[in-house]
Image (tube, rainbow, N blue to C red):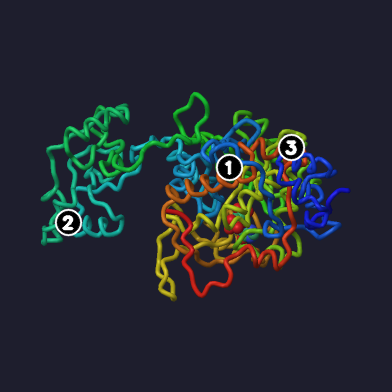
């Protein structure tokens, strides 16, 4: 007689027998199915409504390998594979070049937002493509007219000293000296020009010097900074000793085979003028373009997909956002290389409340990913990721990668400055791209009605003929999270540990075993969710990694 779930073995008089392991395995064979639910039963909305990440858990499997053996290699498009399944959102409080560079160095991908002029966005793409590990390609440069007071202010602002001085105060101009912290520390006449205190006995290295060679020069010269100059003594980049002390080794860095450059992705809209924006981005070296729309199944996006594929066959195009198979089918037919899934699950999003459209994220990811997999189109689970568990659940539902906004907005690498909140905590701004603030941002040239089309927020959430801006997002702030150089490795290690508990050695094996019904799930009642969180403690500190 098969044992029903929850029955005690004692009831069947088997206690003695079950202690013999082989007998336990034999008894197990009597069960028609494995413990828990297969993914299709889990996701069957007829039974229990559409699910979000918090509504279910994954059952543990067998651990036969160390967590560090788990491979997180995963495709982001049909052609491009990453070593970590992590993307940062194309939002103006999340991803500009600094975030994109560090996400790529750490194995993921940062998608540069387009709430800025096409020229500014192309400049950011260039910075990612030109980035060489260890070389600072956009150092803070002073003009000979700058004062000691200004140098002190810059040191206070950026937290580092050692500013190169060039003839006209910019990069690619003749290097004339370097102002170090020591030069200005005890110099009290703040109006003196920096030329009065700067060092002029410079040790430099020529453009084309490799990182290893430059390191040697820095070490033997005992200087804090090494300017790299071209044949005419123009400054082209800078190497810093303090960076050398940090770990400059990024084994997971996202690069195309045979390329030393980091992979770069950016968004555009689907209007006619976005074709010119795309031209500039491609010229700057772009690898992947994401068509940014909250509802991707539109004539405008389908035509843009076809345009990109025809005009720039070397560029991969990701369409979205979608949450249904039908939306996905249209984009797959148009030729997308990847899909972005999510509508209304973002942490700064009010789409579901205002528009009454959207879909709970786990249900959306499963539905679209299982369909897209039949065409070899990888999917991004976009929005609603609050912790490592949510990442693993997004992958479990069939996504190849996840995209995060709010989780990364409070890091050092996101745009903007930290400030102290009214409760005295260190925070950074985070806003939905459909918030009124983002849609009206003057920086994006959208201050007047005429220029609304050039703003990413309005392009994503606003129709040209609309007279009223209807918000689909909010503007707020998130807590300081430190640098992603610590946070992303924590997420990577967390995912590896989770897959180890489940008993799968790679994301590919995870997908495979889920589809075969070997990895199992369980629904989580409201009380199960309470049980699964910290409870009953008088107080506690939640430190996630060290
Ligand atoms: P989060 O990681 O939960 O913060 O979600 C980030 C995602 O929210 C982004 O990648 C976008 O897909 C989505 N998003 C960004 N801005 C808005 C908005 O204003 N309304 C709705 N969704 C948004």
Name the residue rendered at 45%, 58% in the picture: 481
Q: In x, y percent, where is residue 464? A: 68, 57
Left or right of 45 on screen, residue 188: left
Task: Name the element at disc 1.
Answer: loop
- Pick the front one: 290 or 193: 290
Whether residue 359 is visible to the viewer of this picture, yes or no, is no
300 relative to 4 in the view: left or right? left
Q: Residue furthest front?
A: 16
Numbered badge on residue 373: 3
Q: Nearer the viewer, residue 133 or 491?
A: 491
3D distance between C-alphas at marks 2 and 1: 46 Å
Ligand 1 shown in quarter: bottom right
- Depth-wise, is mark 2 or mark 1 nearer the camera? 1
Quadrant assignment, res 356: bottom right
Which residue is denoted by mark 1 in the rendering? Answer: 85
Q: How many numbered discs, if any?
A: 3
Q: Residue at x 42, y 56 (%)?
A: 482
11 to the left or right of 499: right
Q: Earlier in the sequence, mark 2 or mark 1?
A: 1
Judge whether residue 20 can be spotted in this image. Answer: yes
Element under label 2?
helix
Instruction: Name the residue nearer the viewer: 225 or 480.
Output: 480
Sooner in the amino-acid sequence: mark 3 or mark 1: 1
Mark 1 neighbour density, 10 Å: few (under 14) some (14–19) many (20 or more): many
- Circle on res. 148: 2
Under circle 3, the secondary element is: helix
x, y percentage for residue 41? 82, 50
Answer few, some or many: residues within 10 Å of disc 3's Cα (few below 14, many 20 plus, some between 14 and 19): some
């Amino acid at each position: 007689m098969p044992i029903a779930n929850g029955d005690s073995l004692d009831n069947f008089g088997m206690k003695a027998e079950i202690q013999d392991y082989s007998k336990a395995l034999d008894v197990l064979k009597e069960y028609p199915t494995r413990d828990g639910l297969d993914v299709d039963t889990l996701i069957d909305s007829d039974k229990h409504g559409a699910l979000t990440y918090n509504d279910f858990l994954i059952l543990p499997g067998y651990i036969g390998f160390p967590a560090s053996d788990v491979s997180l290699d995963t495709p982001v498009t049909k052609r491009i594979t990453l070593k970590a399944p992590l993307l940062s959102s194309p939002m103006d409080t999340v991803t500009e070049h600094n975030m994109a560079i560090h996400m790529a160095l750490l194995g993921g991908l940062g998608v540069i937002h387009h709430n800025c002029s096409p020229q500014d966005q192309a400049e950011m793409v260039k910075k990612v493509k030109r980035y060489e590990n260890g070389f600072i390609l956009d150092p803070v440069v002073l003009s000979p007219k700058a004062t000691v007071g200004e140098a002190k202010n810059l040191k206070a602002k950026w937290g580092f000293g050692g500013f190169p001085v060039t003839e006209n105060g910019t990069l690619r101009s003749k290097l004339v000296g370097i102002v170090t912290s020591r030069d200005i520390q005890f110099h009290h006449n703040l109006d003196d020009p920096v030329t009065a205190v700067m060092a002029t006995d410079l040790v430099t290295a020529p453009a084309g010097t490799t990182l290893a060679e430059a390191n040697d020069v820095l070490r033997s010269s005992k200087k804090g900074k090494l300017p790299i100059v071209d044949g005419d003594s123009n400054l082209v980049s800078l190497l810093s000793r303090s960076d050398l002390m940090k770990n400059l080794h990024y084994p997971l860095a996202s690069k195309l085979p045979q390329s030393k450059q980091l992979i770069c992705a950016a968004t555009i809209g689907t209007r006619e003028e976005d074709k010119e924006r795309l031209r500039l981005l491609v010229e700057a070296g772009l690898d992947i373009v994401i068509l940014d729309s909250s509802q991707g199944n539109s004539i405008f996006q389908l035509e843009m997909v076809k345009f990109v594929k025809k005009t720039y066959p070397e560029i991969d195009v990701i369409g979205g956002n979608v949450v249904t198979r039908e939306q996905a089918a249209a984009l797959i037919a148009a030729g997308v290389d990847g899909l972005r899934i999510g509508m209304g699950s973002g942490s700064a999003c009010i789409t579901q409340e205002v528009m009454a459209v959207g879909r709970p994220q786990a249900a959306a990811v499963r539905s679209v990913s299982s369909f897209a997999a039949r065409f070899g189109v990888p999917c991004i689970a976009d929005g609603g990721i609050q912790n490592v568990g949510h990442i693993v659940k997004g992958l479990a539902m069939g996504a190849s990668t996840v995209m995060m906004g709010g989780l990364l907005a409070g890091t050092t690498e996101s745009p903007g400055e930290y400030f102290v909140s009214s409760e005295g905590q260190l925070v950074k701004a985070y806003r939905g791209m459909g918030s009124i603030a983002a849609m009206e941002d003057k920086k994006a040239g959208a201050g007047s009605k005429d220029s609304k089309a050039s703003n990413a927020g309005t392009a994503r959430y606003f129709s040209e003929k609309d007279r009223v801006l209807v918000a689909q997002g909010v503007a707020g702030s998130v807590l300081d999270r430190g640098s992603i150089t610590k946070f992303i490795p924590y997420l990577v290690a967390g995912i590896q540990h989770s897959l180890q508990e489940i008993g799968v050695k790679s994301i590919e094996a995870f997908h495979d075993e889920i589809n075969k019904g070997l990895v199992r799930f369980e629904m989580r009642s409201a009380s199960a969710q309470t049980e699964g969180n910290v409870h009953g403690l008088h107080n506690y500190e939640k430190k996630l990694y060290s």
